[in-house]
Amino acid sequence: MNKEMLDFYLKTSMYTNYEPYKEYYKSLPNDMEELTDLILSQTIHRTELRRSRKEQLEQGKSHDHVSEEYPWWKYISHDDILLTAPAITAELFRQDERGFTKNREIRHKVVITCRYVAVLLASILKAKGIPCRVRSGFASYFTEDGKYIDHWIIEYYNKDENRWITCDPDKNSGKDHTDMPHKNFAWIAEIWLNVRSGKDDINKYIHGSSFQGLNMLAYSLFFDFHALMGDEISYLFMPSYIDDDNEFFNLTKEDLKDLDDLATLMLEPNKNFDELRYLFYNDKKFRILNTPLISDNEHLEIEINN
């Protein structure tokens, strides 16, 4: 395996920076089953909290007591606040000085989604000296109606076996979730190309609870591309040149071909690592992002389409 690439995936981003907690992360379990179970014991998924609250409203109580035990006045999602692994960890320590503990009370958990769990797990593995990368795509194992829901997982490199291992901390992916068959996850590059060529049904793929369409798949493609390049952006970060529907649906054939070419490279990220990295550092339209506080107006001095 390419040593330069493995060294790249040992490095941290502003999101996976482990330095404030390096020694603590290294002290956490090395066994992946134990580690992922411990991480999930610190969190509540926002849909889990929503389901629990709905049950309480409709039935007077929830089956898991999450709604009853999680204070009504606390944030019902920390996704907009705890963007980084150190931020998540700091909040966990603030709520319970024991840190990562198996018996964390519900009221002291953080409410985050899969992207944040993946970033936290990747940061811990990097601190342990294990090359790791976050991936964004879709999963079929959250529903029974044939729909695919957007989902984030990780890949980590096993030096003894000389292979990348696909890991989904969420046990809904099956008993082998810490060493999941590659085919069990729906990779966005393949989805994009199959939908674009008419080989796949775009209506199968859903972001969040209802967001569908080719523009949504384009955003997911960029989530995965940036994550592959060590920039694990959040759901609210969008490429500036397609930040709204009007911009996306007015893309030229050449623009769409550029996305097809990007997806083709992403089908084999190890083989095409150098080409992907070149695009990341040189193609402005793939790199310049809008965020909740940064709009097109902030990029006036940049010729994004050149």
Image (tube, helix red, strand yellow):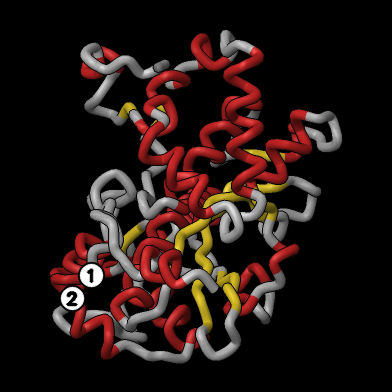
What residue is at 34 percent from the left and 74 percent from the top?
Answer: 126
Most foreground residue, 87 or 98: 87
Q: Position of residue 34 (x, y in %)?
A: 46, 88
- Which secondary structure lies at badge 1? loop
Most foreground residue, 202 or 64: 202
- Asked where in the image residue 19 lies, by quadrant, the reply is bottom left
What residue is at 54 percent from the left and 74 percent from the top?
Answer: 1
What residue is at 28 percent from the left and 67 percent from the top?
Answer: 107
Most foreground residue, 118 or 62: 118
- Which secondary structure lies at badge 2? helix
Q: Position of residue 68 (x, y in %)?
A: 38, 63
What's the residue type where badge 2 is placed? Tyr
Q: Which residue is mark 1?
A: 18
In screen coordinates, is 166 left or right of 118? right
In screen coordinates, is 251 left or right of 77? right
Q: Position of residue 151 (x, y in %)?
A: 56, 53
Where residue 21 is drawn, which disc sits there? 2
In screen coordinates, is 156 left or right of 71? right
Mark 2 touches mark 1? (CB < 8 Å): yes
